[in-house]
Amino acid sequence: MSAASSLRILRALAWLRWRVLINTITRSGARDIIERVSRTAESLLPIAIAVLLTPAAVGLAVFGVWTGWSLTGDPLQSAFPLQVMRWTLAVALLLTLMGPILLSTGAQAAGLIRLMLLPIPARTLYFAHTVSGLSDPWVFLSVPLLAGVAVGGAVRGTALPALAALAAGVAFLLLLLGIASLSSATLQLIVRDRRRAESLVLVGLVFVVVVSLLPSAFIPKDAGRRRGPRHRGEVGLAVPGWMQTTVAAIPSEIYVRAMREAAMGRGDATAARCAGLLIWAALAHGLTWPVYQRMLRTPASSGRARRIAGHGGFATVPLAGPRTSAVAVSFVRLALRTPRGRAIVLMPIVMLAVFTVLFVVRDNAIPIGPVNIGAGYSLGIFGIVLALLAIAPFAFNQFAVDGAGLTLEFLSPISPRELLYGKAAGGALIAAVPCALSLAVGAGTGAHSAVLWSAVIFGALAAYVVLSPVAAILSLLFPRGVDLSSVGNAGNAHQAAGLLGVLAFVVSCAPPAAIAAFALRALDSPAAAAALLAAWLPVATALAYAGFTLAERLMEARRENLLMVASGK
């Protein structure tokens, strides 16, 4: 196929994506105004993200120009900007490699299957797939940074640094696109098998959590408390020779060394570094092309058929009727048999285990932003907060996650109030295991006061009771069809529901926190804290009852829209 034909196909694909966006915004169908606003807001989210990233892109471009301007013969002048460039590009490489694991790939695979039915060459599809990597935030932000270095060198009038920055920047960008394509194609090839995909998303989630918390294990116990200058005889950690050799081969390090060589006027060494980046880029795309071809030829597989358990009856939830218990148990089973639901249960447990191990290793509090997570009550409360926040993808989209099963629930002899109560009870059961483990870990690491732990339990119950009707209302206002085999965006609740839900969670936790602070600070009485929080629980229940009444009326009004969204229409 000629270059002109390929260009026409690429232009048609871009026009297709544009028309899909416009149709999503303008179509109405049988949906009400709330549903249309919800879908429009979700479609415009990438544009909103791009607008929010614009200041960061401008800042990176300015920093890139400064870096290019500093590339002179004096190595001290460019030492700091090149050090920042080294770490920034290394983070971009890591995020590009891990990005497809965090983002959804189901929609991409579905769109690719449709495009394969058209007479489009595989190389054109691969080119479009690669160029789409520019939409990844970390790749998008790398463009102004790399371009700024070349512009800064050109403005300074230094020919070799400017040309080196241009060549190395293009090579590094090609490498990022190759890594993004390789990671995405490999992941899509793996997830063609359902069982293999379920294992992958869980392993990937655990890996991301562990890697994100590992730096805390290496923070010195006296970090930030040491005063005075370092003595002459003090040295840092000795880096082994093999590690130095390995680091020198990392593309971000090659880029920085190319800029340093160009600043010193060493043309041959600069050309060698730029050639090294081009070799990395060629290697990435050379590995991606056969993987991409294999992905195009590999059909999707649902895995082995699951054994359907007999319907021997549902377990009964305490203080709930049989219909409410049936809804709650079905909600829990939906979580336990899907990768997204398993991730909800597993993530707070993994994070709690990692924090516990890090605390044992450090024997000190672990800094998480402005908060220090230590042993005892802070660790237990931290685990409970994680458990309650982890259920957000289900709690804030509790009706649409049922899919076609929502139709059966509406046809069953279950009242709206029983359905609402069952969903709330099911969410509590999902969070119960991580919360219980958090209490056990907190008690096992030094907090032994039963009175204070009872206050924590009363406060957590009150917060969840207040949050439950709000979660139901948000699920009714902003339903979203989801793919529960994905732990990325395809498995999340609507963005508006998620944001408002987090704000509602903070508001629901404020009264218990204020009551506990008053009792422990002003009254200096753990017993008073437990008593006051126990007294707050009935008040929270009354507020929840009023909220469920509003949710019940809203469900009756939006029943048809819920069914349409849950069925994928």
Image (spheres, rainbow, N blue to C red):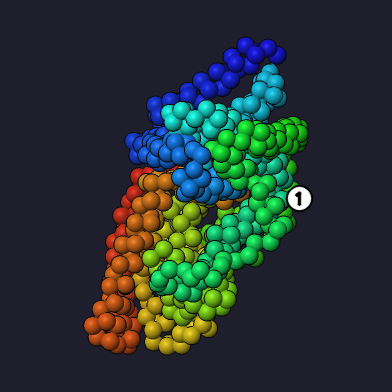
Q: Residue at x 49, y 74 (%)?
A: 221
- Any part of residue 238 in sight: yes
Q: Quadrant of residue 527?
A: bottom left
* Residue 554 % position (x, y): 34, 49
Between residues 184 and 299, which one lies in front from this camera angle?
184
- From what the image shows, is residue 436 above or below residue 79? below
* Residue 290 % position (x, y): 76, 34
SS at mark 1? loop
Give the amino acid at mark 1: Arg
| Quadrant that contains the N terminus | top right
Q: Residue at x 57, y 48 (%)?
A: 90
* Residue 521 % position (x, y): 27, 81
- From what the image shows, is residue 158 above or below residue 318? above
Q: Residue at x 60, y 66 (%)?
A: 237
Between residues 430 and 406, which one lies in front from this camera angle?
430
Q: Is residue 294 left or right of residue 490?
A: right
Between residues 261 and 168, which one lies in front from this camera angle?
261
Q: Is residue 32 left or right of residue 223?
A: left
Q: How many marks?
A: 1
- Any part of residue 323 in sight: no
* Residue 240 % position (x, y): 69, 61
Q: Residue at x 32, y 72 (%)?
A: 513
- The residue to which callout 1 is attached is 304
- From what the image shows, is residue 297 above or below residue 492? above
Between residues 381 and 53, which one lies in front from this camera angle?
53
Badge 1 density bin: few <14, some 14–19, many ≥20, Cα 10 Å: few
